[in-house]
Image: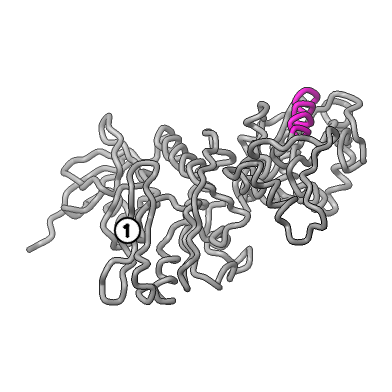
Amino acid sequence: MSTEMGRKWIVATTSLAGCFGCHMSLLDIDEKIFELVKIVEFNKSPFDDTKEFSMECDIGLVEGGCCNSDNVRVLRLFRKHCKILISVGQCAITGGLPAMRNGIPVKELFQESYCNNLTLANSLIPNDEELPLLLDRIYPCHEVVQVDGFLPGCPPRADLLWEALNLLIAGKSLGKISMKNVKYD
Amino acid sequence: MEQSYIQITIDGREIMAKEGQSIVEAARDHGVVIPTLCDFKSLPPAGTCRVCMVQIGGRIVPGCTTPVSFGMVILNDTDDLRNLRKGLIEMLFVEGNHMCPTCEKSGNCELQNLAYQYGMLVPRFPFLFPHRKIESHLPHLLIEHNRCIQCLRCVRGVKAKDGHEIFGFIQRGINIRVTIDSTDPDALTEETAQKAMDICPVGALIKKKTGFKLPIGKRRYDVNGNG
């Protein structure tokens, strides 16, 4: 099977402040995965372990919100290299579970994790220039860059991801997505 | 005294409504669906959520607090009203911290189901991420202010056995919040806590030790919902 473009669709995926559950959900499309690999090729994705963009992509699927400076850098790269950028899952759309820290000062968070934690041998707040800086709060992806579509769920149901990919590949907007597969949990 | 009826029109359909009824009640009697959230069975209307907005002439009014009057022509299912209601639902989502993945009420939540019904994928407004407290000192009830939409159903509908009020509210506007009478912990029995949880349209009032009782697929709106 070929696509209308005469070539495979190039899809990039990443997990920012997420748990990779949305990636797992895409793998949960069962035997349809054989159809998927006929029409889609991954670039810059944990699925084929490509770490950097080597070409411009048609679709970018972003899981997780932005909790540190590296998340922002990667998200901006995705916006630059992907024609259609989709927020996948509650974390990318609302901040999700990591956003439970919003409202707590960063200093307190560090102290709780690295100083007051009972299982620590040495209390030391990590401060290496290699480490990305923690943001003041979690930012949903669309508050950092422009996002073209949203697929809610924790994780989004495999059927929803499959339907969405098919809509996009047919050149349609995600506004037409059926709500029957949409769940926020 | 004999009940008198008056004629009203909803979306072009003529209905004989009982005098003194609200628009929402009259619609419900005749199977016309006007979405509601703060409205609950026999409780007096509060008009807090505004989800039941309907259009009469050029005005948009809440259907639960507006009584029917003779010859009233009501618009209910229009694109403008759908968009307005969807906007209201989105505002409720960004105003609190509604983390559906971790909420015990997910799947049984009226706010969530309305959002499915109105096709919300993402709220159009920025999240406010307010800093609110969780009250866990009561033996049978957990009060999660992050999820409260201030509909005041609990204030209107949950009383102690002897009839005295348990729930109240303090402050106004965006700072309004539900409070509980902690001076008499015995007033809030296990049974009352269950009633409070059932009356709450969201996951703000949770009866302790019963979370996630129904598995995914068997919850209220999994079986009979709009998602």
Residue nearest the observer in this picture, A28 or A146: A146
Q: In terms of image quadrants, where is residue A162?
A: top right
Q: Position of residue B7 (x, y in %)?
A: 19, 47
**Residue at coordinates 38% horizontally, 55% vertically from top-left?**
B178
Left or right position of B102 against A13:
left
For residue B194, side relative to residue B73 (left or right): right
Q: Looking at the rendering, which quadrant does residue A174 occupy?
A: top right
Residue denoted by label 1: B168
The C terminus of chain A, quarter of image: bottom right
Quadrant position of the N terminus of chain A in the picture? top right
Most frequent secondary structure within the magenta stretch: helix
Badge 1 crowding class, 10 Å Cα cut-off, few under 14, some 14 to 19, many 20 or more, is some
Q: Is residue A90 visible?
A: no
Asked whether A75 falls inside the magenta stretch, the response is yes
A30 lies above or below A103: below
Q: What element does badge 1 sit on?
A: strand
Residue B186 x, y percent position in the rendering: 37, 77
Q: Please provide the residue range marked out in magenta.
A: A69-81
Instruction: Out of B165 and A180, give the one closest to the viewer.
Output: B165
Disc 1: which chain? B
The residue depicted at 16 percent of the width and 43 percent of the height is B70
